[in-house]
Amino acid sequence: MTESGGIAAGRVRKIIHIDMDAFFASVEQRDNPELRGKPVAVGGSRARGVVAAASYEARVFGVRSAMPSVTAARQCPDLIFVSPRFEAYRAVSQQIREIFAEYTDLIEPLSLDEAYLDVSDDRQGIGSARATAQEIRARIVAVTGLTASAGVSYNKFIAKLASDQNKPDGMCVIPPASGAAFVASLPVRRFHGVGPVTAARMERLEIHTGADLCMRSLDYLQVHFGSSASYLYNAARGQDDRPVRAHRAAKSIGAERTFETDLTDPVALLAALDRVAEAAWTRIERHRARGGTVTLKIRYADFRTITRARTANVIPDQPASFRDTGITLLKTMLPTPTGIRLLGLTLSGIQRAEQANDLGQPVLPL
C-alpha cells in the first residue's frame, strides 16, 4: 500500500529541492556576454517599477527582487536594468523540467526556477539522493549553461531550507538524524511560510530560532498563530509529511543532449540525433504516450536556438517512425556553417495510451 506521494508507508522519502541561482538575471548574463560579472536587475528602470530579479553582483549592494527600482539604483549606482524576456525563461525552465523527468515522475514545480523532486525510487540506479542531485545539477549546467543549488533531505520543508544553505552553485544534504538539529539552528524568518508579519509576531514573542519555536507547545502556538500552529509545531521538529505532488500532465515528452564539442559534420549530427531519439522514445514508452507532432530543437554554438516541427497524419507509434521524422527535419538544416551544441527531439499533442485507443488511433501494445 502506498501514500498519495507514491511511497510506501514507513519508508523514508528522498526529496531534492532544486533552486536555480538568480535565474532571470543569470539567463540574461548567459545570453549577453557584456552583462557577465556586472550588477544586473531584471525589470523596472532607474525611474520607476520594481526589480523582478537581481544578479549576485547586484545582491552584494543589497539589491533584491520586489525592491523599488529607484531604491535599487540608489544602492547600486552601476546597476544595469534589462527588460524581462519571459519566453526565454520559460524555454529554459522547460529544459530543466525535461532533465528532472529523466530521474523521476514525481516533480512538483513551485515556479519557473524551482521544484521539488521525489527520487526515492532511484530510477537511474545512481545509488543515493546526494549523487542524484549532483548529477542533476551537472546536467543543468551542461544543457543550459546555468547553475542550480540543491537541498537534499527526507522531507520537503528541510530540503527547501537546505537548498538555500550553500547558494550559489551549492548543495546541502540533511539526513534524518540531523533534521531536528538543523532546523533548531536556523532563524525562523528563513522558514518557508513565515512571512514578514509572522516573523515580526514571533520576534515580539521572543521566538528567534527553530530551537525557540520547538520550546513552545502546540496549544501556545494555536493561541498565537491559529491555523498555522500545527505546521509550525511539526516544522520546528524537522517533521513534514507532505508528499511531492506532480500537478500537471506533460504537454510534450522527449530528450535533448548537449555535446562536449560543437558538431558540424552531417554524419556525426545524424548519429547524435539517432541517440537522442532513442532516449526520447524510452521516455515516451514509459509514459505510454502518443502524440501527433514531432519537434526538432537545435541550439547553435552562439546559443541561438531554433525549432522545426512536423505534424503527422498518422501518430508515430514506433521508434523508427519517430526517429525518421526527426532525421527528415534535421536534414533540412544541413549542411550547417555553424557548430551545433545541442539537439533535442520531442513528441507533443500528448495523449496517454488509453486516450489514443478510445479514439481508434494506433497504440503500441504493452
Image (cartoon, rainbow, N blue to C red):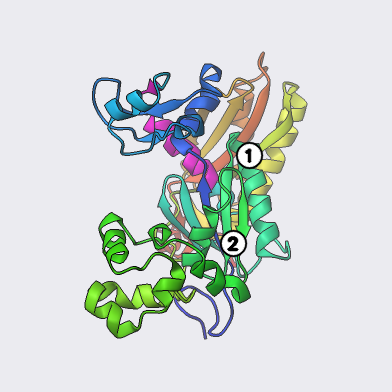
- Contact between marks 2 and 1 (CB within 8 A): the answer is no
Residue 4 visible here: yes
Numbered marks: total:
2
Magenta-tinted stretch: 80-96
Residue 325 lies in quadrant: top right
Q: Is residue 214 magenta?
A: no
The kind of secondary structure element at disc 2 is strand
Which one is earlier in the sequence, the residue at label 2 or at label 1?
1
Query: How many C-alpha atoms fall within 10 Å of the one at disc 1: few (<14), some, or many (≥20)?
Result: some
Give the quadrant of the C terminus. Answer: bottom right
Q: CA distance from mark 2 to mark 1?
A: 18 Å
Residue type, label 1: Val
Q: Is residue 197 above or below residue 341?
A: below
Point 56% across, 24% down: residue: 37
- Dominant secondary structure of the magenta stretch? helix
Report whether 3 appears left or right of 73: right
The residue under label 1 is: 141
- The x and y percentages for residue 238 are 49, 73
**Horizontal and vertical percent position of residue 291:** 47, 49
In the foreground, 218 or 89: 218
Q: Is residue 311 visible?
A: no
116 versus 68 height, above or below: below
Residue 314 vertical placement versus 208 (above, below): above
Residue displayed at 41% across by 79% down? 215
> What residue does disc 2 label?
152
Question: SS of the residue at dot 1?
Answer: helix
Q: Residue at x 55, y 54 (%)?
A: 165
Amino acid beneath label 2: Val
Q: Position of residue 332 (x, y in %)?
A: 59, 22
